[in-house]
Amino acid sequence: MEIDVDKVIKKGIGRIPLVRDKSVFSASDAGQCLRYLYYSYKFPKEEKEEKLKIYALGNKVHDLVKEAFANYNKIYGDFKELYFEYPLEISLNSYKIKGRADIVIKTFSNELIIIELKSSSDISKISEPEESHIWQTMLYMKGINANKGIIVYIEKSNLKIKQFSVSFNETIYENIVKRYEKLNSYLMEEKLPPAEFYFDNEKSWMCKTCIYREECFSEIAIEQVKLN
């Protein structure tokens, strides 16, 4: 029997396309392109194999860090409580925002601190946290009534760390909610959102690996014909 190991890995880490509930939004989608999210609700697809591999490796790195936190606290007892994959929910009008915080620390003064983990191939290029990661952490802080979060970037090859502290900001939170309100309206009206990343020089690179690239670019071509 011949075994194609590469095939086993690709298929073994594959995931069934997520069928989304229109009344539930994910906190991890806070910084995503609205058109991508619209498509993901209307036409669920599995991510590309290479991206699934990256996700799988990132999850393993996160597991190592969580294990390290648990072991550290058993030895030194610096934290009153530790929670991993802590579920949270924010109810808003006709929908909810749900998520799972990687690590939640309760200090002995009963302060809650969110630890959000992000894996990276090269942390030397990171000088500040990504806006989308700040937004995600902000939602987690709102969800459990915490005022402090720490976004941690971990280099996958050697576990080097860069961390950034963020404080809860009500204005930023309200702006995040406005984006979810827009997405909710587009879904309810079945109206395709603008391809915002395509026209954003800092984010247009994400279009290259988007699983809805073909559908989106076809729509852009139609939209441009209509404008002319």
Image (cartoon, rainbow, N blue to C red):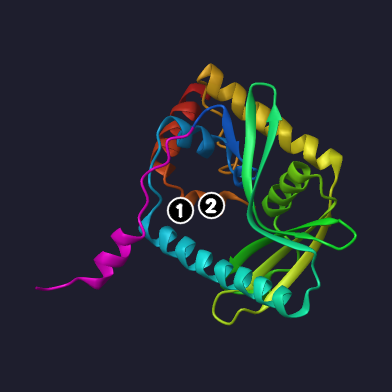
Up-down relation of residue 132 to residue 55 (above or below): above
Choose top left, top right, bottom left or bottom right for residue 94. Answer: top right
Q: Which residues are magenta?
A: 1-20
Residue 33 in the image: x percent, y percent?
Answer: 58, 41
Choose top left, top right, bottom left or bottom right for residue 44. Answer: top left
From the image, which quarter does the N terminus lie in? bottom left
Provide the secondary structure element on which disc 1 rests. Answer: helix
Provide the secondary structure element on which disc 2 rests. Answer: helix
Kind of residue at badge 1:
Thr
| Tags 2 and 1 touching, CB below 8 Å | yes
Residue at 47%, 34% in the rendered image: 20
Instruction: Pick the residue in front: 34 or 112.
Output: 112
Residue 67 in the image: x percent, y percent?
Answer: 60, 72
CA distance for labels 2 and 1 = 6 Å
The answer to whether residue 147 shows anywhere in this view is: yes
Tell me if mark 2 has few (under 14), some (14-19) or many (20+) residues whose alpha carbon lies within 10 angstroms of its own.
few
Residue at 81%, 44% in the rendered image: 145
User: Is residue 130 part of the magenta span, yes or no?
Assistant: no
Disc 1 target residue = 209
Which residue extends farthest right? 109
Disc 2 target residue = 206
Which residue extends farthest top? 189
Residue 108 in the image: x percent, y percent?
Answer: 87, 63
Kind of residue at badge 2:
Met
Residue at 70%, 57% in the rendered image: 130
Up-down relation of residue 64 to residue 32 (above or below): below
Count every numbered label the image shows and give the total. Answer: 2
